[in-house]
Amino acid sequence: PVSAPLPTKAPLKDQVKVAGNYSSTSTLAEVTSDWEKFTFNPIRESQVSRAMTSRYFKDLDNYAESDVVVIGAGSCGLSATYMLAKARPDLKIAIIEANVSPGGGAWLGGQLFSAMVMRKPADAFLREIGVPYEDEGNFVVVKHAALFTSTLLSKVLQFPNVKLFNATSVEDLITRKDAQGNIRIAGVVTNWTLVTMHHDDQSCMDPNTINAPIIISTTGHDGPFGAFSVKRLVSMQQLEKLGGMRGLDMNVAEDAITKGTREIVPGMVVGGMELSEVDGANRMGPTFAAMALSGCKAAEEVLRVFDE
Ligand code: AHZ
């Protein structure tokens, strides 16, 4: 024979037989009680690929039409998503985060210190999501900023109506003209961040899109990635110019960012430090009260639009 016959493929169901040692209700103590007998259940490599890709592409399909897109999974974007997803389980919310790791700047407090300071009354948000803190009078302290971020992330990701697309950048905004000729933001243009970073040295890497009647932009203050959407509004002549973030004044900054969180052009709410670039507001440095409460206000602004 020219070539040996290919081995007969076993049907998939035979390839995934469940190992007999444990049941799906086994406790960890039972599983780890005898390392001699221990073995993992069998798996075929293609099952791993399919488990991931089928879900990812189903999500891309499902969220191509979203109700809300949140740009940036920093402390403000995550707080906004939490409030929105909790209030409206019927809304489909896509979060687009450029980084592999969601959380933005809130994994540390300030400089490279661990603790996170929240001025009152934002301690109410910590109680809402169940993060413990030490009470210092006018402010509270979470023992590690990562405890805040990981708790908030775990809540947000458990909502069935929320999908986080991380390692994905918003590259542009989708626009529509209404009957009066006014521009309205109608969604986002996305690409995997690794692709976004290589437009200059690779050819033909067109983006993807998500349509949504309203977006929340929380991309942070200007920097390598930050203030993305508001800078784009200037170049598309929907904002005359940016005010530019001002120097640090904690007392002034946190009130201004929280109260100023709003729909700045139809279809786009801006919150968190991205707003400082629009309004010429001060920065607050390492106090995170305004990020949580600006998120609450951003969610409220979106709810208002859906209620109209
Ligand atoms: O990766 C960015 C980060 O996680 C993400 N992002 C930026 N541009 C993006 C784009 N597409 C997708 N085009 C994008 N994602 O947005 C997130 C912003 O998080 P952040 O923590 O930088 O912003 P925030 O407003 O939520 O929190 C600001 C925290 C600050 S900065 C500050 C100061 O400088 O004084 N003080 C505080 C409390």
Image: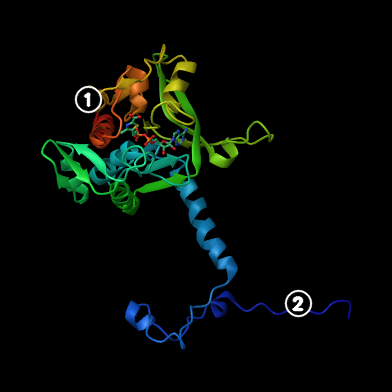
Q: Which residue is mark 2?
A: 6
Image quadrant for the C terminus?
Answer: top left
Which residue lies most toward the left here? 137
Q: Secondary structure at mark 2?
A: loop
For the residue pair 72 and 20, the one nearer the viewer reads as 72
- Residue 244, percent from left and from top: 38, 17
Q: Secondary structure at mark 1?
A: helix
- Residue 20, percent from left and from top: 45, 86
Q: Ligand 1 sits in which quadrant?
A: top left
Dot 2 alpha-carbon crowd within 10 angstroms: few under 14, some 14 to 19, many 20 or more? few
Task: Say if residue 145 shows up in the picture.
Answer: yes
For the residue pair 209 and 112, the one nearer the viewer reads as 112
Task: Say if residue 265 shows up in the picture.
Answer: no
The type of residue carrying mark 2 is Leu
Q: How many marks?
A: 2
Image quadrant for the N terminus?
Answer: bottom right
Q: How is the image coloured?
A: rainbow
Query: Which corner quadrant of the image does residue 251 belong to?
Result: top left
Which residue lies most toward the right here? 2
Marks 2 and 1, Cα distance to the nearest angstrom?
Answer: 69 Å
Location of residue 202 with respect to 222 vertically, above or below: below
Location of residue 94 with respect to 284 vertically, above or below: below
The type of residue carrying mark 1 is Lys
**Residue drawn 89% across the image and 77% down it:** 2
Q: Which residue is mark 1?
A: 259
Query: Which badge, 2 or 1, comes first in the chain's sequence?
Result: 2
296 sits to left or right of 168: left
For the residue pair 175 and 206, the one nearer the viewer reads as 206
Location of residue 121 with respect to 135 vertically, above or below: above
